[in-house]
Image (cartoon, helix red, strand yellow):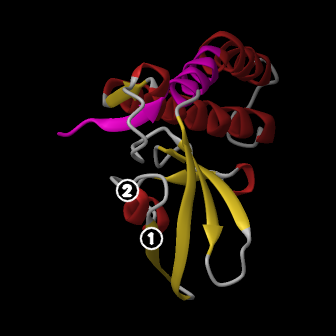
Amino acid sequence: MSKTPLTVAGAEKLKEELRRLKAEDRPRVVNAIAEARAHGDLKENAEYHAAREQQSFIEGRIREIEGKLANAQVIDVATLPKSGKVVFGVTVKLEATEDGNAVTYRIVGDDEADIKQGMISVSSPIARALIGKEEGDLVTVQAPGGAREYEILEVLYVN
């Protein structure tokens, strides 16, 4: 199985969620189950069933995060050679050639992507078009809305 790229910030966020699930959420749900059991008949105890469902969700999420971290290749963009090329983890400033609108994106792993924060997945059409290009290059992106052309203004190697 190949490794999944993950930024340092993305790995830290997953580790923090895992810590919270194990240290806070799991014990809270175990206590809620014990308290619901104390109320008697489990067949008609909605609190018990809700707590068990929540426990199932938490345990599933813990396994999912542990799997992601085990398969992650954490890439620290600050340690990469600053060649001016677009690679995983960099922040890219672009300008649309048709209307001059400037946008800034950070290329991150699939699980970290959040377009509202300017973080795009490495497997997105725009990231795939940008990877390997350099500052000053023109890039054509085949987006769902049609082809768009961008000029790469700047490539930043920051975390």
Task: Answer left or right for 63 relative to 58.
Answer: left
Which quadrant: the C terminus? top right
Q: Quadrant of residue 83?
A: top left
Q: Which residue is mark 2?
A: 133
Q: Which residue is mark 1?
A: 139
Q: Nearer the viewer, residue 78 or 125?
A: 78
Q: Quadrant of residue 40?
A: top right
Task: Answer left or right for 10 relative to 82.
Answer: right
Q: Nearer the viewer, residue 72 or 50?
A: 72
* Residue interval drawn in magenta: 1-19
Q: In the rendered structure, does residue 7 fall within the stretch colored magenta?
A: yes
Magenta stretch mostly in which secondary structure?
helix
Sequence-wise, the earlier of marks 2 and 1 is 2
Does residue 137 lie above or below 6 as drawn?
below
Q: What residue is at 67 percent from the left and 17 percent from the top?
A: 20
Dot label at residue 152:
none
Q: Nearer the viewer, residue 152 or 127?
A: 152
How would you rate the neighbour count of disc 2 (Cα within 10 Å): few for under 14, some for 14-19, many for 20 or more? some
The number of discs equals 2
Q: CA distance from mark 2 to mark 1?
A: 8 Å
